[in-house]
Structures are given as structure tokens and as C-alpha cells.
Amino acid sequence: MNVLKVPARTIALFVLPCLIIYVGLVFVPIVVSVYDSLLDWDGINTAKFIGLDNFKTMFAHDANFWPSVRRTLMYSVFSMAEIPVCLFVAALMNRYVKKANTLVSIYFVPVILSVVIIGQLWKTIYNPAETGGMLNSILIAVGLDSWTHSWLTEPKIAIYALYFVSLWQYFGYHLLIQFTGVQNIPQEVYEAAKIDGAEGFKSDWYITYPMAVPIFKISIVLAFIGSLQAFDLVWVMTGGGPAHATDTIASHMYNMSFLSFKYGYGSALATFLVFVCLVFTVVINFVFKKVEAKYS
């Protein structure tokens, strides 16, 4: 049904410029990257076609590849695990906080800050107590000296320090999305449930959470894909170190492409990352389609 009552050709004519720009900025770079992944190329000199050799090296001979994949997937898991907490907080704020919009805006402040500012701020917080590190100083002040660490220089701890900063930064982002979804649930539904004896946490369990599933899915997809592409915070705070202990797929790709001048190999890493994003997006949409069908 043509609601606008204009010819389809006219609609296509107006959509075409945006479609061309979108294809040029999204799909063409992906295709070029896939082609470059088949080359032995430093990004400057003549390229040599080597087929799938970059992928063979990546899967079988790159000691940093699989650890970076594991860290990236863990990054995604931590990010997605934050979202149920955001939904729970959003439901509480919607019920008990009178000026919840102001509180949500305060939580959103870290999202609008530059990643460089956030990285430098938390690097200062994680510093040793001798150099003014706030976290270690607090631990010492309360008698927990054994809990102090060199948070960003210990290989087994540094990546978790980064995870925490990322969760802190994007808590307000996902809280805003969930709070908006909760607010859009009709009050008539809650009033009808109250007549039947469902209120408080019981109404949240049977009404708020099921009806928030579509918005919940949006946050899950955004958190997962955003975490797979995690680079800026890692680069600002640790540069992938110490000893590649905080390398993600994106930071490893940057190292290979622009520091080691293995542009073809970096393109192979980028191709793998795009493939993982597509696969998991399809899987997440499939799972939530089943969940939405259950609660619809």
C-alpha cells in the first residue's frame, strides 16, 4: 500500500542518493578489505596475490590472534551482562524516582566525554599510590594493602581493569535506552495488572521485562558489536600491552596494518571481524525473535 500516494519511481529517486552514499561508505570498503586480505602488501609497494595464506597464518601461526579473540569475546560478554542490570535499574527509577530524567542524564555524562579524557582519567586512578593513584590510595587507607596492584601493567589484571572502565562508560548509554523503553510501556497495562493483584516487582517480572524485550535486544546488539570493535579505550590506556595482554582484534589489526606494515594481513583480521559481527548479529536476532514470539 502506497501511503504517500506517489509513484514508486519518485520514492526510489529520493532514496537513491542516500543508498549510494551508504553503499560507498559501508559495503565498498568491506569488499576492498576482503580483496586486500588476499594480498601480501605493506600498503605502499606493489602487492602480491597470495590467496588464503593470510588466513592460514592468522588461524594457525599468529600467537596473538586467538588470545585477542578470547579477550574481545569476553569484552562482549561483560558488556552484555551489564544490560540486565541497566533494565533492572531503569524499572526501579521509573517507579520510585520522581525526576528520573535528570538522574539518567547524569549517568549519561561519561558517554559524551572523549575516550581520551576517560582513558587518561582512569590511568590516573589506576596509578600506584606513590604517584597519586586514587584506587590504591583508598585501598591502603582502609587497610587493604594486599589488594593493591599495578592495575595496567600486570598482564593478568590489566584487561579486567579495561573491562571495568568500559562498563562504567557505557552504563548510562544502555540505561537511557532501557529507561526509554520502560517509560513507553502503557500505564493502563500496570493498572489492569494491579486490579488482578500484580504490582511492584511482580508486575515488573510479568509486564515490564517481557514488554521491554525489543528494546533489550537493541542494547544487546549494540553492546556486542561495539565490544567487538573495541579499540580506542584499549589504545589510549594500554596500547595493547603489557606484552599484548590487552590486545583485542581491533588493536591487533591496527598493529599489523600500521605499525608492522602488514596491510594485507591486517585486512584479513578486519575481514574476520566483519564476519564475526555478521554471524553473531544473525544469531542474536534469531534468539530474540524466538523470545519475542514467546511473550507477544
Image (cartoon, grey):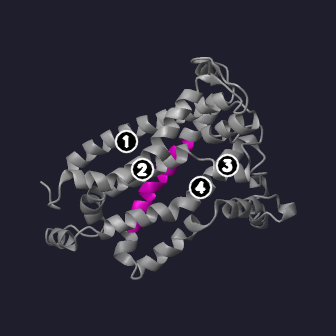
Q: Secondary structure at mark 1?
A: helix
N-term mark: 2 or 3: 2
Locate residue 222 relative to residue 125 in the image: left or right: left
- For the residues marked 1 and 3, what is the alpha-carbon distance in whole angstroms? 26 Å
User: Can residue 271 be seen from the camera position used here?
Assistant: no
Which x, y percent locates residue 35?
Answer: 54, 27
Residue 166 image label: 4
The residue that mark 1 highlights is 284
- For the residues marked 4 and 1, what is the alpha-carbon distance in whole angstroms? 21 Å
Residue at position x 68%, y 30% in the image: 64
N-term mark: 2 or 1: 2
Looking at the rendered image, the disc whose residue lies closer to the viewer, 3 or 4, is 3
Locate residue 160 relative to residue 177 in the image: left or right: right
The magenta segment is 74-90
Q: Are marks 3 and 4 in contact (CB under 8 Å)?
A: no
The amino acid marked with disc number 1 is: Ile
User: Does residue 256 sit above or below 94 in this rendering?
Assistant: above
Locate residue 295 relative to residue 67 in the image: left or right: left
- For the residues marked 2 and 3, what is the alpha-carbon distance in whole angstroms? 21 Å
Residue at position x 59%, y 47% in the image: 230
Residue at position x 48%, y 63% in the image: 173
Between residues 117 and 103, which one lies in front from this camera angle?
A: 117
Classed neighbour count for the residue bearing mark 4: other residues with Cα under 10 Å, few (<14), some (14–19), many (≥20): many
Locate residue 285 relative to residue 271 in the image: left or right: left
**Within the magenta stretch, is there residue 75?**
yes
N-term mark: 1 or 3: 3
The residue that mark 3 highlights is 234
N-term mark: 2 or 4: 4
Residue at position x 14%, y 60% in the image: 5
The amino acid marked with disc number 4 is: Ser
